[in-house]
């Protein structure tokens, strides 16, 4: 694509086989398919499979049901139009007299539709003028037409569409976090092995104790004290050894699992911070907090306690089985008979429990979400006296939680008693078979008692192993929810081959930009070039796309179509953090973090000197009021800057922007939440800030944009007018209307004030 | 209700509205106010700029052919496929691709996350796919057993 940008991609090859065959028959010799669109909806919006094709000679379309083809050769007056609504795109073909055809498609096909339209327009123009079709001056993505940097092969827009689900073996993926602790894990495993072996010695000792001492004594032989001392000493030694080894392995493995948990938590949080605003917009705070807090903790407990126990149990069962078989294979076989049955039962229940626990987790975050919704909005709740309604909502969420839990507990509570029952039955079988074997003199009483001692432990382990099922499932569903975050690819991805800008001058070019939020097009076909140092005022009704445009320039979101370039480089090829360092942002509601004023001013540049901080505060006209505070720059301010007025907080945030000395400055309604006196003060601070920087200011009050070099009037995602205040007033267009409306409003306010 | 306006479709397929003032406005769109909870109540005719021209409380009040013109235009704009059956899902972890039977034919949807399934009143579910298309499940209890079982894993 880079070497031959004028050659269209072999669009025909990407067509599904059935269509390609059909289409080939229709095409004239040498006719090239340039683009195609699967029109997957019919006029009544039923799913279907229609096809629209643009070739270098005509536009073709295939009706979905009859398979009939229609065609339109390029001619004067022909035109194609795209628009979309609620997830349905419409492509219309018109000429001067009316609509010739109309196709509909789901928005998943939007990119092919755009490409089709583009090719159609180029070919049409070429046929009318007789000139060869226009080609892109630079390479563009063959799929979505976003411009590519010279060294980029993969389109940053298309590459992010990943729809593969994460694998189900989620817990194994925790290995990524366990890997740094391999050595300690191995040590822990060996210790587990040794300590388990040590615990298996005492039951073995019951055999000689029974056969060599107790039974001979019953038959009249005296007790051999030395032998008894030896055996009992062995028992004590084995117990002490098992104790010491058990302590060492528990300690080591607990240390490791605690570290794995901590790593998991920090990694998840770091990843979360890198995700785009789009992600945060779609998630609820309570849910995210629960995932990072309690889910990681649950995984942690699982690793340090349950998994460890489970491993010990498996080892114990394995070793016991070996010992039993070495003593007497027949009795061992009978003893181990219920094992596969129990294993099967565990497997069956596992599946049910896992989905149940996942469900409980989701319901649980529903409960916390109610809290997270209500507590910040408590003033509204109280003002409208809706406490009861909110309490009901909480009760409803809890009821749902209970219902889900109840259903799960039905299965779960049946599980443990069943395992216990099987244990008893197993013991019964061993007794019966053992007594029979003793009666046939096949085994001694000592062997039977050793067996009973072993399987007493053996079956209790099975019982506790059955408990692992639930905790494993809980941990697995927790891990899945963590990996849901970790697997989420940022929709503002870091470029694979980043371009570094040493010096930013602040030239911004927006070309053919389109942005879609959900199924709503917020920005459409927007072009704007901003010179370095220029101040642009963005004007328009609320909902006209001003803030979205600013968010796109900050790269909080990525464009759906087109490109934004800074100093000639596409935003998507700049490293995100590096780019944002050049941007100063002053928002309508300044957010102050918990900390001192100095820390807040230095937020974007933590290594700033005190002189720099004071200079920035002075320039922001914040110095004096800060000095009036009892602790000056060391005064603590809370989350929302309690104790500071709106204007004061705003000036701190202006100082914050000034300190990083950005080349691009964005003022999003910076003065609209304060009264007009405060606004004047802030305006003075802003004037200092704006100097020599590329500035994009959004303001509701048009009077605050007097200093702007150009005003850009937006309406429904498009630019409708550009010019200075005087030019736009003279034109008497959209800006004039906005201005008049505000002037009238101001008059009314003044009259009211006077009255 | 007396109807103080005229509606017609021009050769470009757009609705043309002529109000009491006699001015013809092209590209008029009908919009339902409560498309899901009460589709029959409240249809508004808005012009190309989104300004309301007339409020129609019940579609049935309109005389023919205006009524069918409005209904026709609504049918071509409203796209909320109703899920009749879930044939299969690619995985129980999201993103997950679902193979569906809807009232508008067979379709697939890509569910980005469980939070894209919204519970509405009366057991209705609204599912947004990754392209922003809204799928509706009108009555969860009315789905067949297998669909409910699949769906249950996401709820």
Image (cartoon, coloured by chain):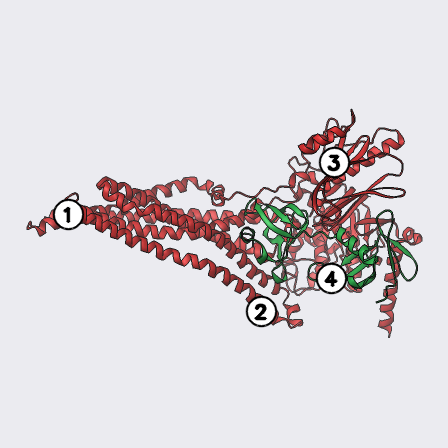
Q: Are marks 1 and 2 on the same chain?
A: yes
Estimate the spatial distance between the alpha carbons at disc 2 and disc 4, rounded to whole Å. 33 Å
Identify the chain of the residue marked 4, using the numbered disc in the image: B
Task: Return the disc, 1 or 2, that comes first in the chain's sequence.
Answer: 2
Q: Which residue is mark 4?
A: B40
Estimate the spatial distance between the alpha carbons at disc 1 and disc 2, rounded to whole Å. 71 Å
Q: In the drawing, what numbered circle is on residue A391? A: 2
Residue farthest along the bottom direction in this orientation: A755
Residue B106 % position (x, y): 64, 45
Number of callouts in the render? Answer: 4
In-image side of A573 versus A404 (left or right): right
Residue A721 % position (x, y): 86, 49
Image quarter in which the C terminus of chain A is found: bottom right
Letter of the chain in red: A
Residue visible at 61% across and 69% down?
A: A389
Q: In the drawing, what numbered circle is on residue A439? A: 1
Task: Return the disc, 3 or 2, that comes first in the chain's sequence.
Answer: 3
**Chain B, colour shown:** green
Q: Are marks 2 and 4 on the same chain?
A: no
């Amino acid at each position: 694509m880079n070497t031959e940008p004028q050659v269209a991609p072999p669009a025909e090859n990407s067509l599904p086989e059935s269509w390609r065959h059909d289409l080939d028959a229709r095409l004239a010799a040498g006719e090239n398919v340039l683009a195609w669109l699967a029109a997957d909806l019919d006029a009544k919006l039923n799913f279907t499979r229609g096809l629209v094709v643009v070739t270098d000679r005509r536009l073709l379309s295939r009706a979905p049901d009859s398979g009939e083809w229609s065609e339109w050769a390029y001619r004067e007056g022909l035109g194609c139009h795209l628009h979309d609504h609620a997830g349905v795109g419409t492509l219309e073909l018109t000429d001067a007299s009316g609509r010739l055809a109309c196709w509909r498609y789901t928005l998943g096909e939007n990119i092919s539709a755009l490409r089709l339209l583009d090719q159609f327009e180029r070919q049409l123009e070429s046929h009318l003028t007789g000139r060869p079709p226009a080609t892109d001056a630079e390479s563009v993505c063959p799929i979505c037409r976003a411009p590519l940097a010279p060294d980029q092969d993969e389109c940053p827009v298309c590459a992010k569409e990943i729809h593969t689900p994460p694998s189900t073996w989620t817990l194994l993926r925790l290995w990524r976090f366990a890997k740094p602790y391999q050595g300690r894990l191995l040590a822990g495993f060996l210790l587990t092995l040794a300590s388990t072996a040590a615990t298996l010695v005492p039951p073995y000792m019951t055999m000689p104790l029974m056969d060599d001492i107790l039974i001979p004594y019953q038959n009249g032989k005296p007790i051999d004290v030395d032998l008894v001392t030896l055996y009992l000493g062995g028992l004590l030694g084995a117990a002490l050894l098992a104790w010491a080894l058990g302590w060492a392995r528990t300690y080591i493995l607990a240390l490791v699992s605690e570290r794995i948990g901590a790593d998991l938590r920090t990694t998840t949080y770091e990843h979360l911070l890198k995700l785009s605003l789009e992600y945060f917009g779609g998630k609820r705070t309570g849910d995210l907090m629960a995932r990072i807090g309690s889910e990681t903790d649950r995984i942690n407990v699982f690793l340090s306690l349950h998994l460890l126990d489970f491993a010990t149990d498996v080892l114990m069962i394995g070793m016991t089985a070996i010992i039993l078989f070495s003593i007497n294979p027949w009795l061992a076989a009978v003893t181990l008979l219920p094992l596969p049955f129990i294993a099967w039962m565990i497997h069956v229940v596992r599946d049910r429990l896992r989905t149940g626990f996942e469900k409980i987790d989701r319901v649980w975050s529903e409960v916390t979400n109610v809290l997270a919704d209500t507590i910040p909005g408590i003033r509204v709740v109280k003002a409208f006296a809706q406490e009861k309604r909110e309490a009901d909502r909480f009760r409803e969420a809890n009821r749902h939680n209970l219902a889900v839990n109840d259903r799960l507990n039905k299965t779960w509570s049946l599980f443990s008693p069943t395992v216990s029952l099987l244990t008893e039955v197993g013991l019964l079988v061993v007794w019966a078979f053992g007594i029979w074997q003793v009666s046939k003199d096949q085994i001694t009483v000592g062997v039977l008692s050793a067996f009973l001692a072993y399987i007493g432990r053996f079956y209790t382990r099975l019982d506790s192993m059955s408990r692992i099922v639930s905790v494993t499932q809980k941990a697995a569903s927790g891990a899945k929810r963590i990996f849901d975050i970790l697997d989420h690819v940022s929709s503002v991805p870091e470029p694979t081959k980043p371009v570094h800008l040493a010096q930013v001058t602040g030239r911004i070019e927006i070309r053919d930009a389109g942005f879609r939020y959900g199924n709503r097009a917020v920005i459409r076909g927007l072009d704007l070039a901003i010179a370095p140092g220029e101040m642009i005022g963005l004007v328009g009704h609320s909902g006209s796309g001003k803030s979205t445009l600013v968010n796109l320039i900050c790269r909080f979101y990525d464009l759906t179509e087109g490109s934004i370039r800074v100093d000639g480089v596409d935003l998507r090829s700049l490293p995100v953090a590096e780019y944002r360092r050049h941007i100063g942002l002053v928002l309508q509601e300044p957010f102050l973090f918990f900390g001192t004023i100095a820390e807040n001013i230095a937020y974007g540049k933590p290594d700033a000197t005190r002189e720099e901080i004071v200079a920035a505060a002075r320039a922001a006209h914040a110095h004096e009021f800060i000095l009036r505070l009892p602790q000056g720059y060391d005064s603590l301010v809370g989350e929302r800057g309690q104790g500071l007025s709106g204007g004061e907080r705003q000036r701190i945030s202006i100082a914050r922007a000034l300190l990083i000395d950005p080349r691009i400055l964005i003022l999003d309604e910076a003065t609209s939440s304060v009264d007009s006196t405060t606004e004047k003060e802030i305006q003075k601070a802003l004037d200092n800030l704006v100097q020599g920087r590329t500035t994009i200011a959004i303001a509701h009050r048009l009077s605050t944009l007097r200093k702007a070099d150009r005003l850009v009037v937006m309406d429904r995602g498009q630019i409708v007018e550009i010019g200075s205040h005087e030019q736009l007033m003279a034109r008497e267009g959209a800006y004039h209307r906005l201005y008049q409306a505000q002037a009238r409003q101001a008059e009314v306010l003044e009259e009211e004030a006077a009255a | 209700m007396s109807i103080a306006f005229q509606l017609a479709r021009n050769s470009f397929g757009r609705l043309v509205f002529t109000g009491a003032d006699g001015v013809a406005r092209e590209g008029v769109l009908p919009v339902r106010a409560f498309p899901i909870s009460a589709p029959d109540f409240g249809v508004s005719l808005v012009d190309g700029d989104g300004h309301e021209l007339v409020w129609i409380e019940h579609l049935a009040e309109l005389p023919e052919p205006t009524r069918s013109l409005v209904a026709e235009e609504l049918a071509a704009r409203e796209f909320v496929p109703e899920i009749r059956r879930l044939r299969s899902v690619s995985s129980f972890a999201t993103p997950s691709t679902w193979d569906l039977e809807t009232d508008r034919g067979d379709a697939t949807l890509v569910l980005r996350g469980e939070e894209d399934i919204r519970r509405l009143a009366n057991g209705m579910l609204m599912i947004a796919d990754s392209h922003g298309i809204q799928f509706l499940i009108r009555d969860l209890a009315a789905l067949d057993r297998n669909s409910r079982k699949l769906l249950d894993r996401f709820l």
